[in-house]
């Protein structure tokens, strides 16, 4: 279990403990609400304390980030070898294969999923909190936090200089102009609980794109989401008139090309919430996408 510590600065003298917890220690309101009812989760000078206790300069505050939840339930008939790119006491970076869902799906009993695989890997000692989610068909990197505190800190950092994500994608057609920003609001499509579309009353959505290589049939793209809407990259490229290859929902399904939308979470940069270490990871372009781009960028796909 992760423990946080803080010495009360002079600027917080004679203030409620909650100000330290919410301020210097960056605990979210929901996490603080949960922790304050757990025995010895919050200590002031080694003694269990209420969040309304008054602190003084030099006092020592300790918070244990234990989580009150049932042990993770997983189905060990769903084997999945995790490709763990990085792991420490607080988080993991995972390279997800294509066509694996993040969570168990009702309509696919026995199919592997990332939540079950991580629950099995962690063995009930921790619960994985997905900082962001990838569509079932999308491959590549994502972050799983081992406690709610790290999850909160990384979620706040999403789409800022403290946490950046880049994707690689293959779109159908010659994308023009070859770079730009797509700034189109996205909302739920009428009559569907899954499909999204560009609509005037949707949520603000921004995507940067750059063509890395192209011919008359395909364009190999660098995509950088500035917001995190459901299906954002797929919707935005389709709205430009260049849906992703293999995208059955927003384009045309053609399993002779690729059996899923050609989208890969390629690169991650983020600052660790506690150590403040700068971390950087990449995940090689999967073989099914390489087959589409061998003639475009064969020497630069690693």
Image (tube, rainbow, N blue to C red):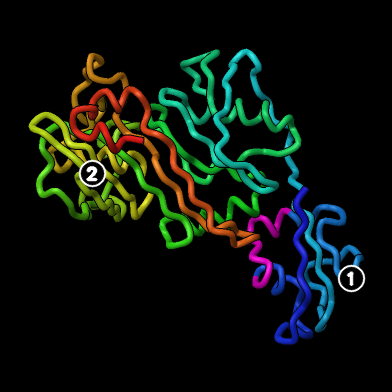
Where is residue 185 shown, x and y percent of the image?
Answer: 25, 51
Where is residue 186 shown, x and y percent of the image?
Answer: 27, 47
In the figure, residue 276 lies in which quadrant?
bottom right
Q: What residue appears at the point 23 percent right and 44 percent down from the top-left corner?
A: 236
In primary-sequence order, the first of circles 1 and 2 is: 1
Residue sitting at the far front: 299
Q: What residue appears at the point 67 percent right and 72 percent down from the top-left corner?
A: 24
Foreground residue among 283 and 119: 283
Task: Name the residue that disc number 2 marks.
Answer: 236
Q: Residue 149 carries which label?
A: none
In this rendering, position of residue 274 left or right of residue 168: right
Where is residue 5 shown, x and y percent of the image?
Answer: 77, 65
Q: In which quarter of the image is the C terminus?
A: top left
Task: Name the residue that disc number 1 marks.
Answer: 45
Label 2: state its secondary structure.
helix
In this rendering, position of residue 30 left or right of residue 142: right
Where is residue 225 shown, x and y percent of the image?
Answer: 33, 50
- Which residues are drawn in magenta? 23-34
């Amino acid at each position: 279990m992760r423990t946080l510590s803080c010495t009360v600065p002079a600027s917080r003298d004679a203030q409620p403990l909650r100000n330290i917890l919410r301020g210097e220690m960056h605990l979210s309101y929901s996490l603080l609400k949960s922790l304050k009812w757990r025995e010895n989760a919050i200590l002031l000078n080694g003694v269990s304390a209420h969040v309304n206790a008054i602190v003084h300069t030099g006092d020592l505050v300790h918070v244990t980030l234990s989580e009150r939840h049932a042990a993770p339930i997983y189905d060990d008939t769903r084997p999945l070898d995790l490709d763990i790119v990085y792991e420490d006491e607080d988080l993991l970076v995972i390279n997800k294969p294509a066509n694996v869902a993040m969570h168990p799906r009702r309509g696919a009993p026995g199919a592997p999923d990332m939540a079950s695989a991580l629950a099995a890997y962690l063995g009930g000692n921790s619960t994985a909190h997905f900082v962001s989610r990838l569509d079932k068909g999308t491959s590549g990197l994502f972050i799983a936090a081992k406690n709610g505190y790290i999850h909160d800190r990384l979620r706040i950092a999403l789409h800022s200089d403290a946490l950046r994500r880049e994707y690689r994608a293959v779109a159908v057609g010659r994308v023009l102009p070859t770079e730009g920003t797509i700034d189109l609001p996205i909302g739920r499509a009428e009559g569907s609980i899954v499909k999204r579309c560009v609509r005037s009353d949707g949520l603000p959505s921004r995507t940067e794109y750059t063509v890395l290589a192209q011919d008359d049939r395909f364009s190999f793209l660098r995509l950088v989401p500035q917001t995190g809407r459901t299906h954002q990259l797929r919707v935005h490229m389709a709205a430009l008139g260049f849906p992703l290859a293999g995208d059955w929902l927003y384009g045309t399904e053609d399993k002779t090309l690729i059996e899923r939308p050609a989208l890969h979470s390629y690169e991650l940069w983020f600052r660790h919430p506690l150590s403040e270490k700068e971390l950087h990871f990449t995940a090689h372009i999967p073989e099914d996408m390489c087959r589409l781009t061998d003639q475009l960028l064969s020497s630069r796909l690693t």
